[in-house]
Image: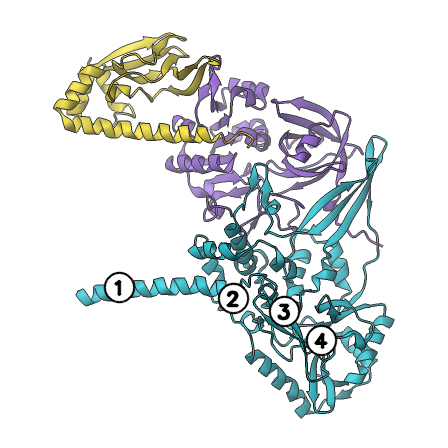
Amino acid sequence: MQTLEPYLAEHPFLKGLDPRHLNIIVGCASNVSFDAEQYILHEGEEAASFYIIHKGKVALEIFTSDRGPITIQTIGEGDVLGWSWLIPPYHWHYDARAIEPTSAIALDAKCLRAKCEEDHDLGYELLKRFAHVITQRLEATRLQLLDVYGVH
Amino acid sequence: MKSFITEPMIPKPFRIHRKLKETHDTYTIELESTNGADGFPFSAGQFNMLYVFGVGEVPISISSDPSMPKMLKHTARSVGAVTKALLKLKSGDVLGVRGPFGSRWPVEEAVGNDVVIVAGGIGLAPMRPVLYSFISHRDKYGKIILLYGARTPEDLLYKRELEQWRGRFDLEVKVIVDSATGNWRGNVGVVTTLIPRIQFDPLHTMAMICGPEVMMRYTLKELQSRGIKNENIFISMERNMKCGICLCGHCQFGPKFVCKDGPVFCYDQIKELFGKREI
Amino acid sequence: MNIAILENDHLQTLIDVLRKRGYQVIGPTLGEGAIVYDDLNSTANLPIGWTDEQDGGIYRLKKRNDKALFGYNVGPHSWKKYLLPSELRLWKIKRNGGSFQIVTENEAARKFAFVGVRSCDIHAILIQDKVFMNGQYIDQHYTSQRKDTFIVAVNCGKAGGTCFCVSMNTGPKATFGFDLAMTEIIEGKNHYFLVETGTELGAEIFREIPHKEASEKEKCAADDVLKKTAEQMGRSMDTANIKNLFYRNYEHPRWNNVAERCLTCANCTMVCPTCFCTTVEDVTDLTGEHAERWRKLDSCFTMDFSYIHGGSVRASTKSRYRHWITHKLATWIDQFGTSGCVGCGRCITWCPVAIDITEEVHAIRESETVIGKQKTVVKEDVHANT
């Protein structure tokens, strides 16, 4: 556990967090790794944790019956994977597949939700940071929707 | 009796040496002069007016190496009547060329700096001469980073060269597509999302952007948030160029003429106009 | 200044001398229900005794109660009809084995003598000179026509309902850019022109025409006429800091207002003596062996004008009107160091819905003054409370 703290403290997603809050988060964290092609999470499954990517590359996919899995976004080092753990009913909305060997820090969702309920300051701080990530993803998605390179 | 028409208004015949298929709708045509001239000096960023016999003319940026003026290359996408006719021509056919026109990328000015090139779609074509120049004088520059966004993996231009560039240790090349099916191992998303992932010295970095206006708008925001100053950001604008020599009025962008003052502009000089609607 | 008197009866001699020297003499004449420019072989072709009534969207010919030769203002034509023809073949091309060969047009430039050029139109010609002859590339056709153009200016004896040359500093008196300038004087039975020479060539030609020196009193007659004309201006425009006025107001509700009226018919650009935009058209014959390229006058009011693949940059009426007026009054100054408007009023007269460039400027300027005043009031209130 002690080894995770300095890394998390410097991670862009958690940088500048109150040490007390960081300590709580570290208490819910564990190291995980995935092989290339390994699915990290599947649509519909319970969102039991979220991941701070340390190294590697992960594809977010939607499976379509006619075209197979379509990658809608790739994320990598410095990114955060998953926010469905924050919002009821806590089920994943996409598939996530490691496309390179990927190491990450998993944060236990139940543990963190409980801590956030106990300490709303922590909850608010985390929500602000997730809101930022969600906004960026939404903006990127909107630009993708524009199909700017297509012939119109 | 002198001709009424200025020399730059008269297309010169060039023969298609080779035609390369880049994607399902985009080709690169390689041109050589029919009268064995000494070549066609141009600067990275400039464009030519290409004339298809009886059909019309279209402005296309030059995408070849400025240090090899005997072989002109243009990459064009089949979207309008003229480009469709242009790309139906075969090797050995002759087309007309007027140019080169317009401003250039700040290749010289970037010496000693890091360089971030952000290209979107067909916007990689006018950036290729820049990359050739950087690579042949590699030691004069700091980091050289190319971020390239396209619609799908199938829409990527210059795939072989991209692979070569990516294989070099002295270039950082990141490619991203808007959507992909399962067998694509690269990045998926918007080209702007690559910007936070690269490292450069913001105070000594020149950025060059070429792509659709909306893509350039969001790219600008990301580059600015990384601390690159407006006077070190260059963008390439597109307008309806007809004459190429600042006489027909078509390519106006506020007080600027894209054919003469552009297509490459320093962002600082057009920041009041860029992003305004329907200018 | 050397001012001479040319009797009305001797004006024909001027035309004859010009023709003898190889000039195609062009001047105002009645046609198409208006006063238009056409060949002028005789003073009888001039609209003698006619005048025009002009206002927003209104142009009407009327009889005068004298025999004035130039007693009207500018009509729908301007001299760009000759210097920047609406259609010009640039070259012909033919297939030649596997290649092609271009045949350029080698006609001799025509020598034009323009008679009856108003001061505003001289300014317009000089503005187009800057566009076509002053840049990195010059327009060879325009330049060859312009080189031999002989200009006989006529100072305006009255102002039209849509004139505002005084605001634009372009009239009513021609002060430069002419070979000869005339002021028409009718006093009872006396009908003569006070003639000023502007160039050596003008003086040389004038020497071939019977004339006499003007007395001091007669010289003053011209000034009196022009003073009266200046006071009659149908319109006015406040041009103070006009460039920045437009640069500040790219987003202004007035553009929506004008867009509700504008038909994007392009009349204003066609009648404007400075509008210079052209397009090219490529045509081919049925065999496909020969093709031609034509240059044609174009207008920024069409959708095609700003078309790039995917659509027009300026798709809305609002953006097209804004582009036109902003070009005329603001961006032109950055591009060519001069306003693109000479105050001739043609765009007002020939607009089918009477959109008035002076009124649009006024509306935008006025809106700023109102906002400015409100700000001042607020400031004063703050002071009152402290």
Q: Residues within 10 Å of mark 1 (few under 14, many from 20)?
A: few
Front label number (4 vs 1): 1
Q: CA distance from mark 2 to mark 4?
A: 32 Å
User: Subunit of mark 1?
Assistant: C
- As drawn, the chain in cyan is C
User: Subunit of mark 3?
Assistant: C
Q: Residue at x 40, y 16 (%)?
A: A61
- Looking at the picture, how far across and down is residue A103, in whole percent? 33, 12
Relative depth, front residue between A87 and A52: A87
Q: Which residue is mark 2?
A: C358
Q: Residue furthest left?
A: A118
Q: Are the residues under badges 4 and 1 in a single subunit?
A: yes
Q: Residues within 10 Å of mark 4 (few under 14, many from 20)?
A: many
Residue C151 visible to an observer of this rendering: no
Which kind of residue does numbered mark 2 sit on? Answer: Thr
Secondary structure under the numbered disc 1 in the rendered image: helix
